[in-house]
Image: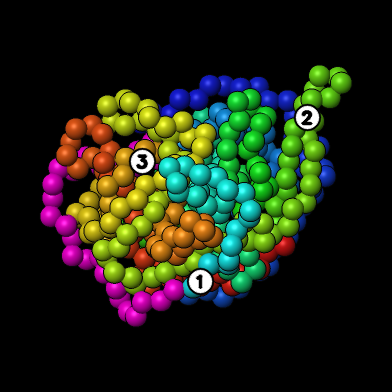
Amino acid sequence: MNSRARRLTIPLTGVLMIAGVIGATTGANAGTAPSDVVSSAASETAGEATAFWSPERMRKATDASDDLDLSVKGGKASSAAGPDGRAGSVPPIGQEGTRSIKSKQVNLPNTVGRVFFTLPGANPLDPGSWKYCSGTSIQSKYRNLVATSAHCVYDVKTNQFYDNWIFIPSYWDGDQAWDGKNPYGIYAAKWFNAHDDFVVKEDYDFDYAFVNVHSGFKVNWEKGTDGKWKPIIKDVGRLGDNVGGQGFAWNQKVKNKVFSFGYPAGLHPDGDKPFTGRTMKWCFGTTGAMPAAPKYNLQEHVGFKCAFTAGASGGPWLLKYKNSTRTGYLNGVNSVAWDTDKNDRYDRISSPYFNGDTYQVYKVAANRWTK
């Protein structure tokens, strides 16, 4: 799937205004973490990252998963995925907002949204470096945590964490570039938390990450009498207070019924583009062990039937999902799209199996404070 981005000239007036109003924010020290947990501070302040993402840039961003696909016909399921200890879970934060968004009688979770970032070491003004994934708010002590895929926070090509990283829960794209976007605010990264085996070994059995975010800001763009777009900014507080947070579960059964949510927008291998990425989509199915895939050093993935394309990466897999509260238990993230019958159409999505290693990374992130 090839990225298709056009060069765009963005006026800097509104960007500078946002940065000036929001200002710089600070977080806690990284502290002590297990040796296999990699934590890294974001390279921008909350004001800088939030100010960067004008509505035009969001609309021109392309999916970051253009090479994450496998064409595998058949193949024996790997027996490597499975519990490495006792099963455990952490409950959701509770009921989310009062808005009821329905799609085929499935109430979409307010916790799920789009992640935006720029490529490290690249010119941030080049539209080719504007990328996005999916993610979800998740339970944490300070209600400041986003779960996504590790390849949505870390660039294995340059061995660096991404720049200008933000999360927008319940993102939706209106008919005009300035409509919609951030109904519950924009939340900029402070700390990235991933597993050492992904960061060092590029092992997609560890393709998950947990990002501590700053308190959010609601940004609306209005056209002034001078014809120029100007930002209207409001401090909205903590992520979890605004949209809630999904629970977390690990060492569960390999075979489970889950919902997956995300913002797919990429092409199928045959060039068809069924999704736009403008609104959230969902899949439902029963998970099972996937074949090993040496291309990604992958042996412990579980997957199910789903035709999601790139852009959905990082979106949550939720066990025991309840439409009434729009909450469940995070037990996977969209990681790799598969064409198992080689008909040039993706037919399965897979996730690393969430085991004790996943819980260790989550535990570090779930107890990290941010302002």
> Looking at the image, which residue is at 26% across and 41% down?
347
Q: Position of residue 71 (x, y in %)?
A: 21, 40
Binning the other alpha carbons within 10 Å of mark 3 as few (below 14), some (14 to 19) or many (20 upward) gives many
Q: Position of residue 250 (x, y in %)?
A: 38, 70
Is 180 within the magenta? no
Q: Is residue 270 visible?
A: yes
Q: Is residue 124 visible?
A: no
Q: Position of residue 314 (x, y in %)?
A: 44, 50
Please state if 44 lies on the left or on the right of 223 as rendered.
left
Q: Quadrant of the C terminus?
A: bottom right
Kind of element beneath mark 1: loop
Q: Which residue is mark 1?
A: 91
Q: Which residue is mark 2?
A: 222
Three-letter residue code for mark 2: Glu
Three-letter residue code for mark 1: Pro
> Looking at the image, which residue is at 73% across and 57% down?
237
Tell me how far mark 1 sits from mark 2, CA to CA.
40 Å
Is 80 within the magenta? yes
Q: Position of residue 337 (x, y in %)?
A: 31, 44
Q: Residue furthest right?
A: 225
Above or below, 85 relative to 332:
below
Kind of element beneath mark 3: loop
The magenta-colored residue range is 65-89
Q: Which residue is mark 3?
A: 308
Please state if 324 lies on the left or on the right of 267 as rendered.
right
